Amino acid sequence: MTPETLTLSNGLLRFTASAMGTGPLVILIHGFPDTRDTFNAQLPALAEAGFRAVAVSLRGYEPSSQPDDGDYRVTALAADVIAWIDALGETTAHLVGHDWGATIAFAATALAPDRIASLAVLAVPHPARFAETYLTVPAQQARSAYILEFMSPDADAMIVADNCAYLETLWRKWSPGWSFAEGDIDPMRRAMQQPGVATAALSYYRLAFDAVSDAGKAAQALLAGPFAVPTLGLTGEEDGCISADVFEASMRDADFPGSVRVEPISGAGHFLHREATDQVNSQLICWMRRH
């Protein structure tokens, strides 16, 4: 099966999506540094399992979705997800988010829990609890040091220099056991080198630290939860970005009145859905069938 290419709109911006299958809607949200192609192995598996799987390019990851006002706060990103559900003609959807996509999925769930059938987050845990845990774990502070580099105005050029060599290094650090091929990383390289994409992607990080403006406070409130839908958390045991123990410590029952389950994925790193495809697909399909 070949994915269908769709164009979704939130009324102002246009987002490209890949879709397969029919049935209950599943929206897959990619992270950084990545593209919607990261879910190429999930789309057919979900379609065969009876779902309508749609992987969408994030705000700013293509020129057509770069807003004039530069708003890349999670409030706007969460609203995009709800707009995608509307554009696809549905009232609810299951959400699957990886990396930044997980953070966005959390925010969308907090924004409109009645629109979300279930939530599955890969590699990134409860955002506010992660921030708390980070402060007490020096090893995690070291793993997250790259974020400070992104605050520099020179970072936009740095991450795309030498055919995105810096970003390839991140992939290798974050998934040390994954021998990815050129074909795996090329879509990310192409996306990041489009006009404005590197700046947009880094803006996610730069705006995340705003806790002073009204918009920043609203974003922080969304990420604090609680998250009132059934939530599955998957973490790679070899994740070099956010360690599995930090992930598990950040996923607390009290924050998930709709229920939560955390499952470590053995032998996988940060890109667990690409490294342990069958195991992750099985977890996702079983979870969504239950909910």
Image (spheres, rainbow, N blue to C red):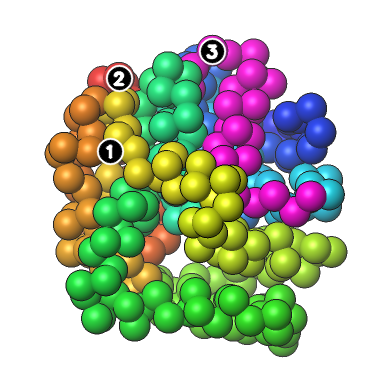
* First in residue order: circle 1 vs circle 3: 3
Q: Which residue is identified by label 1?
A: 232
3D distance between C-alphas at marks 1 and 2 = 11 Å
CA distance separating discs 1 and 3: 21 Å
The secondary structure type at the circle numbered 1 is: strand
Local secondary structure at mark 3: loop
Q: Which image quarter: residue 75? A: top right
- The residue that mark 3 highlights is 91
Return the x and y of residue 167 as percentages of the image width and height. Answer: 58, 76
Q: Is residue 224 left or right of residue 216?
A: left
Q: Is residue 8 magenta?
A: no
Which badge, 1 or 2, comes first in the chain's sequence? 1
User: Going 42% across and 42% down the picture, which residue do you hit?
Assistant: 221
Query: Disc 2 on helix, strand or loop?
Result: loop
Q: Which residues are magenta?
A: 69-93
* Residue 178, horizontal then vertical, whole percent: 40, 71
**C-alpha distance separating marks 3 and 2:** 15 Å
Name the quarter where the N terminus is drawn.
Answer: top right
Under mark 1, the amino acid is: Leu
Q: Is residue 199 above or below residue 142?
A: above
Give the residue type that dot 3 points to. Answer: Thr
Relative to 69, say whether 137 is above or below. below
The location of residue 88, given as percent across then percent down, is: 65, 20
